[in-house]
Amino acid sequence: MPRDASPRSYLMCPPHHFRVTYSINPWMDPAKPVDLRLALAQWEVLRDRYTALGHTVRLLDPLPGLPDMVFAANGATVIDGRVLGARFAHPERHREAAAHLEWFRAHGYPDVREPTHVNEGEGDFAVTASCLLAGRGFRSSPLSHDEAQEFFGRPVIGLDLVDPRYYHLDTALCVLDDRADEIMYFPDAFSPGSRSVLARLFPDALIATETDAAALGLNAVSDGRHVLLPQAAAGLFAPLRDRGFEPIGMDLGELLKGGGAVKCCTQELRA
Ligand code: ARG
């Protein structure tokens, strides 16, 4: 049975200043050249796909000297129109947090909170119907989980990430249906205890293989029906279709050199 999509609003930041000049995750190799024009073209295809699907895309102005700003998912977490800003772990990205806070204030969001503890926005927070899944281990501080729980009034389930290739929760887990509790994830990215927690909470989850996870296939965005994901994660397409989803393969190969794909470029503005 095909699923129902629901209209979404996304915040994206064009990769005008995208570069790989430093390495803060194992995907980043400053020695590898980046084709900026291609990066922009690939990003535009993603943006246009969202609008063609009926979603709203709002834009954040990219700032020079912030090459990772294209990864807009990391800049905040928005639920019920309330905004928890980010605080980045690495100095190279610190200034992005203020740019996001400023955007929300300028766009009339009444409740915008600057966080006390390090959290990298939707990189480490994933919203399901019943809770907030929260990654820790590489970037977001465990203390940010309590902060998010208090701010959003939603139960937070902390999950320990153990493999540096999957340094953010959104590289290892994706919420497929946020009206139910349906997710896909790669178990090996998590500690044994966190794996048990996920198995207990999501017994029907779609389990990704190592190959699909390594193609950043879990760095995907779902509107409840369409699942936009890296096209190289070929093994995920059939299981998604079997569940009634419509997988849409995207090529963000240039942005992958920064360690990000579809989800990293997309922050959801939940009204
Ligand atoms: N180069 C960026 C970093 O390491 C990539 C961020 C990817 N974003 C994400 N939501 N996983 O911080």
Image: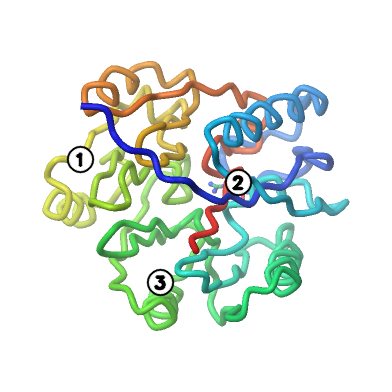
Residue at 37%, 62% (x, y): give it.
Answer: 134
Depth check: give the residue in front, 192 or 105.
105
Q: Which residue is labeled 2 in the image?
A: 56
- In the picture as drawn, the residue positioned furthest to the right comes out as 64
Disc 3 is placed on an element classified as helix
Check disc 3 and give the amino acid type: Pro
Depth check: give the residue in front, 104 or 117.
104
Q: CA distance from mark 2 to mark 1?
A: 28 Å
Q: In the rendered structure, which disc, 1 or 3, sits on the residue that comes first in sequence?
A: 3
| Image position of 67 with respect to 242: above or below | below
Q: In the rendered structure, which disc, 2 or 3, sits on the residue that comes first in sequence?
A: 2
Residue 157, horizontal then vertical, whole percent: 28, 65
* 198 to the left or right of 91: left
Check disc 1 and give the amino acid type: Ala
Q: CA distance from mark 2 to mark 3?
A: 32 Å
| Image position of 130 with respect to 203: above or below | below
Residue 224, horizontal then vertical, whole percent: 35, 41
Q: Which residue is labeled 1 in the image?
A: 205
Residue 141, horizontal then vertical, whole percent: 47, 70
Q: Which mark is residue 142?
A: 3
State which mark lies toward you, 1 or 3.
1
Q: Does ligand 1 reach within 8 Å of label 3's beta carbon?
A: no
